Amino acid sequence: MTNLVLNVLVLVALGAVSWPVLRRLRAWPLLGACLVLCVLTAVFDTIMIDVGLYVFDPAKILGVYLWGAPLEDFAYAIAAAVLVPVLWTVLGRSPRTSSRPDEPSAADPAAPPRAEG
């Protein structure tokens, strides 16, 4: 299996699982994050490949490079740009992780006084 086939399968599965949450998120921040991560991938992957930190098997990649980084390597940046906001949204909705309590604590001096009546 080539890297491209594996990346497409993972991105399709991630998109299918994340779709209910992705529909509710704003598109421009997601696209901006994706663009920034792809630029960072192009810069740093090119450096890491040039210094010999890792090498790609030519039989497993298309051979298309963007500024020194193989095209398939950008799938990880796209997956991160999708997965992190989705997880942030899903995991941030738990009442246990909420930073705002439903009702102010009696010991909280900054809490406004309650009207008794």
Image (cartoon, rainbow, N blue to C red):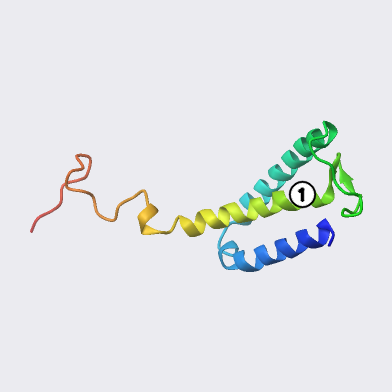
Q: Quadrant of residue 12?
A: bottom right
Relative to 65, is 20 above or below? Answer: below
> In terms of secondary structure, where does tag 1 sit?
helix
Relative to 48, is 13 above or below? Answer: below
Report the side of 50 relative to 114 (left or right): right
Number of numbered callouts drawn: 1
Pinpoint residue 103: horizontal percent, then vertical percent.
25, 54
Extreme residue in the left direction: 117
Pinpoint residue 98: horizontal percent, then vertical percent.
37, 52
Q: Quadrant of residue 65?
A: top right
| Residue bearing the label numbered 1 | 74
- Identify residue type, mark 1: Phe
Report the side of 12 relative to 17 (left or right): right
Dot 1 surroundings within 10 Å: few (below 14), some, or many (20 or more)? many
Q: Quadrant of residue 95?
A: bottom left
For the C terminus, the image quarter is: bottom left
Report the side of 98 relative to 102 (left or right): right
Instruction: Name the residue located 74 percent from the left edge and 45 percent from the top edge.
Output: 38
For the N terminus, the image quarter is: bottom right
Instruction: Name the residue located 82 percent from the left edge and 37 percent from the top edge.
Output: 49
Instruction: Name the residue located 21 percent from the left edge and 42 percent from the top edge.
Output: 108
Pinpoint residue 101: horizontal percent, then vertical percent.
30, 52
Q: In this orientation, which residue lies closer to the viewer: 69 or 109?
A: 69
Pinpoint residue 6: horizontal percent, then vertical percent.
78, 61
